[in-house]
Image (cartoon, rainbow, N blue to C red):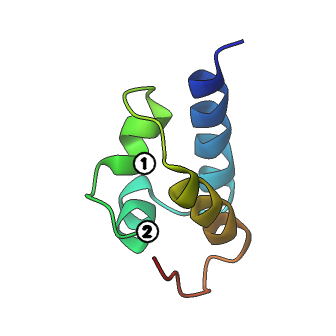
């Protein structure tokens, strides 16, 4: 199983389940507006820092993110 595909697919499901748009999440993480969309479509792979911040953001969407 492809790690990029698995992470991108899972991220998309978790994000949509919590009603967070890809653009909103990208900007909240301090990235360009298409960053999360690119990860979900297997065009990019997140850094370890963004990986963990994504998980925090999904589990606590109202918590401020510090990069």
Percent coordinates x, y for residue 39 in the rendering: 45, 38
Q: Callout 1: few (<14), some (14-19), or many (20+) C-alpha neighbours within 10 Å?
A: many
Name the image quarter holding residue 30.
Answer: bottom left
For disc 2, the neighbor class at 10 Å (few under 14, some 14 to 19, many from 20) is many
| Label 1: element kind | helix
Q: Is 56 on the left-hand or right-hand side of 37?
A: right
Q: Quadrant of the C terminus?
A: bottom left
Q: Is residue 56 left or right of residue 45?
A: right
Q: Is residue 32 above or below residue 24?
A: above
Distance Cα–Cα, label 2 vs label 1:
9 Å
Q: Secondary structure at mark 2?
A: loop
- 27 or 46, which is in the foreground? 46
- Residue 34 at x, y percent in the picture: 29, 48
Q: Which image quadrant: the N terminus?
A: top right
Mark sitting earlier along the chain (2/1)? 2
Q: Residue at x 40, y 66 (%)?
A: 24
Residue extending farthest to the left is 32
User: Which residue is more in the foreground, 46 or 39?
Assistant: 46
Total number of numbered discs in the rendering: 2
Q: Residue at x 60, y 85 (%)?
A: 62
Whether the residues at callouts 2 and 1 have beta carbons within 8 Å, the answer is yes
Q: Residue at x 37, y 37 (%)?
A: 38
Residue behind mark 1: 36
Kindly identify which numbered label has been placed on residue 10.
none
Residue 32, position as x, y percentages in the image: 25, 58
* Residue drawn at (58%, 42%) of the image: 12
Above or below: residue 7 compared with residue 50: above
Residue that numbered label 2 is attached to: 29
Q: Is 30 drawn above or below residue 26 in the view shown?
A: below
Q: Residue furthest front?
A: 48
């Amino acid at each position: 199983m492809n790690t990029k595909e698995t992470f991108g697919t899972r991220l998309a499901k978790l994000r949509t389940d919590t009603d967070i748009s890809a653009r909103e999440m990208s900007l909240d993480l301090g990235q360009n507006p298409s960053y999360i969309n690119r990860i979900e479509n297997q065009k990019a792979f997140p850094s370890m820092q963004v990986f963990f911040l994504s998980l925090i953001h999904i589990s606590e969407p109202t918590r401020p993110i510090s990069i």
